[in-house]
Amino acid sequence: LHNENLHPNPQPSLFQVLASHVCKRWREVAIGNPSLWSVIEFRGGTEDLERSKVYLERSKRAALTIYIDLAIDEADRDEEEEEILSTLETAKEHDLYKDLDEFLHLIQPQYQCWRVLEVMVSHYLLMHLVLETLTACPGAPVLETLQLYLYDEHVDDEHFHPAQYRQQDFVLLNGDVPRLPRVALWGVHLNWTKSTFLSGLTELELAYHAMDVRPSFRDFLRILRTSPDLESLSLCQSGPAGMPSDWLDSVVGSGVDAESTSMGSEAPLSITLPIVDLVLAFLPPDYLVALLDRISTPKVQSLALDFDNGDYKDFLRRI
């Protein structure tokens, strides 16, 4: 699962550039076709920034597909660079941060045209800069895919780091994303209670969340229940926070009638999902068993499992 091949980056297409260089007529046609310039890929550096400016100008009001890839291979990560990018004061002077900041300022005014936004970084402060930009936008009326990937090999199972960013009081895009069916959040947590825009989903991927920043069971259920057409669910070292006692408290403690939780049944607070693709990875056996006691998936056709060492016999019996 922790394999970038699962989310391959599209290779830059030079067709539109080549077409615009054939002759005067071809150049007029190419430059006059906004859809040819609607896929923008940013990997840092002056050349990408200049290219992005040209593409944004030529794309006019076409729906935009935006890929930001500033991820660094684990083998290439440098200790000095890690230190620089670990605090906001020093990160602001790093080329990666400055390049990303400039690129985000370029695309932010085009928020009404974003159709796909995929971001891949290896440092949380870079991702936080993206989150701040998304928070400053009043909405994204045509956004259909939001994928935020933080590649960090050192995720703490219990506590989120850096701790000063554990509390998220903002809501992305003012919660105004009426056409958003596909969401992936790797190592990126939100204010789950306020993020009611996480509804009407067809694909949901939650991965690499420390226990103290996972959604409560109440919020987790709300996301699932308000997505009646959910087709794909992936939980990789993520899911509702806590264990069954915490799950019940998160619902009953929020003003829900205790009798409505079916406390006498074997699977209280249960839900049946229509998903056909299910991924479960890097979750402890007792957690998985408790989760499957409460989530029924009778239509699953594709099941992917990836676990560390442990006794998963009870889980296997459940499925």
Image (spheres, rainbow, N blue to C red):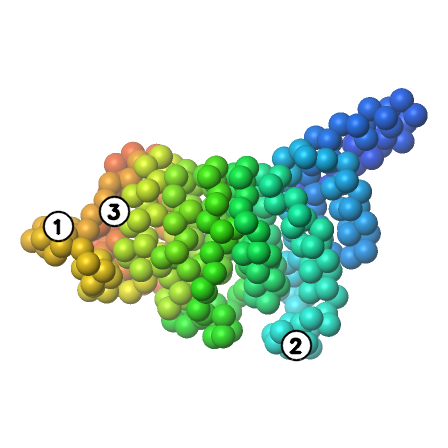
Residue at x 65%, y 44% (from the top left corner): 110
In the rendered image, residue 130, in percent from the top left (x then y), is placed at 59, 58
Identify residue type, mark 1: Ser
Q: What's the CA distance linking mark 1 and mark 3?
A: 17 Å
Whether residue 244 is visible: no
User: Which comes sooner in the sequence, label 3 or label 2?
Assistant: 2
Residue at x 65%, y 65% (from the top left corner): 75
Q: Is residue 127 left or right of residue 250?
A: right
Residue at x 23%, y 65% (from the top left corner): 246
Between 63 and 269, the one lying in front of the other is 63
Q: Nearer the viewer, mark 3 or mark 2?
A: 2
| Label placed on residue 169 | none
| Label placed on residue 260 | 1
Mark 3 falls on what kind of element?
strand
Residue at numbered disc 2: 89
Most extreme residue toward the front is 138
Between 278 and 47, the one lying in front of the other is 47
Count every numbered label the image shows and give the total: 3
Q: Residues within 10 Å of mark 1 (few under 14, many from 20)?
A: few
